[in-house]
Image (cartoon, rainbow, N blue to C red):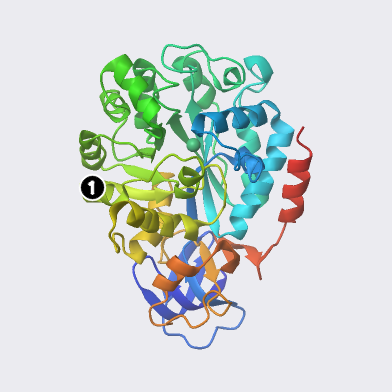
Amino acid sequence: MSAFWCELAWTGERVESNVVVETDGERIAQASAGIAEPPPGSTRLAGLVIPGFANAHSHAFQRALRGRAQTERGTFWTWRDRMYELAEALDPDNYRELATATFGEMALAGITTVGEFHYLHHDRGGAAYEDSNSMGRAMIEAAAAAGIRITLIDACYLHGGIGVAPEGVQRRFADADAGEWVRRVSELDEPDGVRVGAAIHSVRAVDPASAALVADWARERERPLHAHVSEQPAENEACLDAYGATPTAILADAGAVDARFVAVHATHLAGSDFELLGDGGTTCCLCPTTERDLADGIGRGRLLADAGARLALGSDSHAVVDSFEEARAVELDERLAAGERGRHSPSDLLRSATANGHTALGWPEAGRIEAGALCDLVAVDLDGVRLAGTDRTDPVPAVVFGATAADVTDVVVGGRQVVADRRHLSLDVPRALRDSIEALP
Ligand SMILES: [Zn+2]
């Protein structure tokens, strides 16, 4: 058993002072407020301690595009060509190195669980590796090396577009059919800190009958099921042309839309889609910093929440890795579109980044500081240049609207300290990023 003493802690519901968190293995045994003196042997965490962030939508390799594919004129589709060139250069070894570095950056930013939406499965030309899960296992090893938990959201990808065979690098994403996807994914095991989820890449890449098979697999095994949904108007148009229904409606018909479903982006929804997603008790994972970067559009977080959906957050392409920025962007970007302020409370935004994200990744026992929860603690410095002067009786608004990932000083994942004094304890993250990115062709 070990103990952490928190100057201030946001439990997921409220802020308490002088909180002692005692651990029992990876769980919190007890969290007690009002203990002014840190107990002997406890680790002191200054500032505001919050539960760990869940990064509910990540493509780890896209970290290598930061600053390299952000400046040219174009659209989502021209950006995708750059992303495809990068994907073509990866193999299990350099993919593991790059993902380890990216997950290290996430650890430093207070992310304790990543949802890796994984679709780069096969060797060049599309042939299976000897172990057909080599690339997925590289992601699992990378998360372990970075000291964070992972949900490997293994994506079924079959078509290059509706009715179009995969071509070029898309052949590396594609399984022969949904049955092959089931066979491959069923071979993945779940060591400590790992869970496996399912994904329907998108209605572009998976036909409705195959989507139903993936949904069946997720339902039978009680796994999270994610899908890219209506990120771009062109996806909606192609779907309406082919099937006469929206992507959300197609997925609902396939039996995908229920409480385990996570609609990623959900940017360009029709009116009836809000109802389907809300009534299904789904989570919608917004990725505002990527959606900005790719000129996708502004998510309708308020309407989704009003309809009954939970919101979660992802850094997706990793244009930045900063869960504070994702959280406030849900509110601030929507202000620009709506001409109205105060659409989401700071606590709701923080819950999107923590508990809701963990639930979306199949870790409902994480994201709160209370007995029984996984012991994930993230200390945010309140005395640095950005947050000095914060009202210590009500620090959440300042943290949500003013903190950056650089204000995270200490990170505990499942009772184990991974970051101390802004340093990763087992990884030189800047060096790992530089080396892994510079090694790419
Ligand atoms: Zn994505």
Task: Using the rendered view, name the quadrant where residue 385 is placed.
Answer: bottom right
Name the residue tied to disc 1.
308
Give the quarter of the figure containing the C terminus: top right
Left or right of 20? Residue 43 is right
Frontmost residue, 53 versus 292: 292
- Foreground: 233 or 24? 233
**In the image, residue 104 above or below residue 207:** below
Q: Mark 1 is on which residue type?
A: Gly
Coordinates of residue 153 in the picture (x, y in percent): 49, 35
- Toward which corner of the image does residue 3 lie, by quadrant? bottom right
Residue 194 appearing in the image:
no
Q: Nearer the viewer, residue 400 or 374?
A: 400
Image: 110 above or below 127: below
* Mark 1, other Cα within 10 Å: few <14 / some 14–19 / many ≥20: some
Quarter in which the N terminus is drawn: bottom right
- Image location (x, y in percent) of residue 410: 60, 68
Exactly how many numbered labels are in the figure? 1
- What residue sits 60% from the left and 56% below the top? 107
- In the depicted structure, whether residue 124 falls above or below residue 152: above
Which residue is at the front of the view, 221 or 67? 67
Report whether the residue tagged 1 is closer than 8 Å to ligand 1.
no
- Give the residue drawn at x 69%, y 41%: 98
Q: Residue furthest bottom?
A: 36
Residue 276 in the image: x percent, y percent? 23, 36
- In this orientation, does residue 154 appear? yes
The single residue placed furthest to the front in the displayed view is 73
Residue drawn 73% across the image and 55% down it? 430
* Residue 6 coordinates in the image, percent (x, y): 51, 77
> Label 1's element?
loop
